[in-house]
Image (spheres, rainbow, N blue to C red):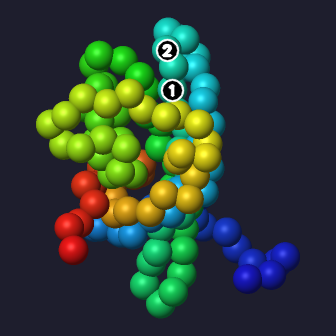
Amino acid sequence: MDWNSKITKDSGTVKDGEYPYLIVDAEQKRTKETLKPMLEVCAKIGLEQGREMELRDWIVLSEETEWKVGQFLVSIGQKERGKECIPDWSPNAIIGKRGRLKVKNRNDRSQITWLAPQKD
């Protein structure tokens, strides 16, 4: 591609499937409308032929999305499935964590499911 190339794509999606991830950024924010606490996570995933791609996910701390919060915490090893925990939301406790996630594309947007770590 060069400065005179035609540009046809205006969004990037990854194929549906499971991918290894590395969390490269995590920032505490608030949702725009309801001002609920939210964690914006940036995960780098490994693709075929050694390529990588960054995906973003927004994890809202609310009763309605507690399942997703728990799913994320299990995936990064802060929570055991079926047990309560008080999470450490500091960047040091999140950035650098590795695991697996599942991507499913819906309406030109990637939906992320955080998977539990695999047992050896």
What residue does disc 2 label?
Answer: 36
What is the residue that sits farthest to the left in this orientation?
Answer: 82
Number of residues whose C-alpha sits closer than 10 Å to that of mark 2, classed few (under 14), some (14–19) or many (20 or more): few
User: CB atoms at circles 1 and 2 under 8 Å apart?
Assistant: yes
Q: Quadrant of the C terminus?
A: bottom left
Q: Nearer the viewer, residue 1 or 22?
A: 22
Which SS class for mark 1? Answer: strand
Residue ID at (29%, 35%): 70
70 left or right, relative to 98: left
**Mark number, residue 38:** 1
Query: Taking the image as drawn, is residue 16 in sight?
Result: no
Disc 1 versus disc 2: distance between alpha carbons?
A: 6 Å
* Residue 75 in view here: yes
Residue 2: percent from left, percent from top: 80, 81
**Rendering quarter of residue 21:** bottom left
The amino acid type of the residue labelled 2 equals Lys
Residue at the top extreme?
34
Task: Where is residue 88? Give x, y as percent.
Answer: 49, 34
Query: Is residue 22 positioned above or below 112 on the image?
Result: below
User: Up-down: is 30 above or below 70?
Assistant: above
Is 10 drawn above or below residue 119 in the view shown? above
Quarter of the image holding residue 35? Answer: top right
